[in-house]
Image (tube, rainbow, N blue to C red):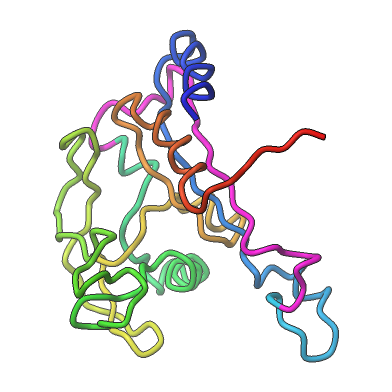
């Protein structure tokens, strides 16, 4: 991990720090996957098609004219709010299907994001009328207080929405978490994220 991080830093020196961090996860409901099912099969029954849920972690550096410099720029690239279903029904459906963090705390004490009775994924977030550019190395996204909507058996508001880019969601119909990078720490985090989890071994034969 340390060597990969050091190998990546020359690119940061040349192209400056990344601007966006994307986590792109396969949607098992994509038509290409569902059309490959036979009979009553479900995607999890076909590890030859999807092994777990394939996903990618991507750092993007924007050109000089597209740099994120103000809180208004943050709002252009990233949203952390439920879309209006009256003006954007398809986006609303994708966000409520793919971009809502599973309710936890008193709403759902059995959520996987709960550990020892405490939330561990920083959700629900706080309502915020305006984005803030850099708070302890991370931006805080706009999450205005609006009426809740029913998602499955839970009532959800903007505090539970995972940050996303509307254009990417409509194009790919998947879980695509988009975060604004406020520092070069995102490069190190990228490799920590990839190598976290179970121990692994690299073997040459």
Q: Left or right: 187 with respect to 133?
A: right
Relative height, residue 64 to residue 163 (above, below):
above
| Residue 120 drawn in magenta | no
| Residue 64 drawn in magenta | yes
| Percent of width and height locating residue 10 | 49, 11
| Percent of width and height locating residue 53 | 62, 62
| Percent of width and height locating residue 11 | 51, 14
Q: Looking at the image, which residue is at 42% across and 46% down? A: 178
Quarter of the figure with the C terminus: top right
Relative height, residue 104 to residue 54 (above, below):
below
Q: Looking at the image, which residue is at 42% across and 68% down? A: 87
Q: Looking at the image, which residue is at 20% across and 60% down? A: 125
Q: Left or right: 17 with respect to 104?
A: right
| Percent of width and height locating residue 66 | 43, 25
User: Which residues are the magenta region?
Assistant: 45-72
Judge by depth and name the residue closer to the eye, 14 or 198: 198
- Quarter of the view holding residue 204: top right
Q: Left or right: 96 with respect to 58?
A: left
Judge by depth and name the residue closer to the eye, 187 or 124: 187
């Amino acid at each position: 991990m340390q060597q990969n991080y050091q190998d990546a830093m020359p690119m940061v020196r040349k192209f400056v720090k990344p601007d966006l961090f994307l986590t792109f996860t396969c949607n098992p409901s994509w038509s290409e996957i569902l059309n490959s099912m036979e009979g009553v099969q479900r995607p999890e029954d076909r590890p030859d098609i999807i092994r777990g849920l394939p996903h990618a972690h991507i750092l993007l550096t924007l050109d000089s004219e597209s740099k994120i410099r103000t809180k208004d720029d943050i709002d252009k690239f990233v949203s952390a709010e439920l879309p209006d279903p009256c003006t954007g029904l398809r986006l609303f459906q994708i966000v409520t299907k793919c971009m809502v963090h599973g309710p936890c705390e008193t709403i759902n004490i059995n959520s996987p994001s709960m550990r020892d009775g405490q939330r561990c994924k920083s959700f629900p977030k706080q309502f915020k009328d305006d984005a803030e550019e850099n708070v302890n190395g991370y931006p805080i996204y706009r999450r205005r207080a609006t009426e809740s909507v029913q998602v499955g058996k839970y009532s959800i508001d903007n505090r539970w929405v995972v940050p996303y880019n509307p254009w990417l969601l409509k194009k790919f119909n998947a879980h695509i978490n988009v975060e604004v990078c406020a520092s070069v720490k995102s490069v190190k985090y990228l490799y920590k994220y990839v190598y976290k989890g179970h121990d692994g071994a690299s073997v040459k034969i």
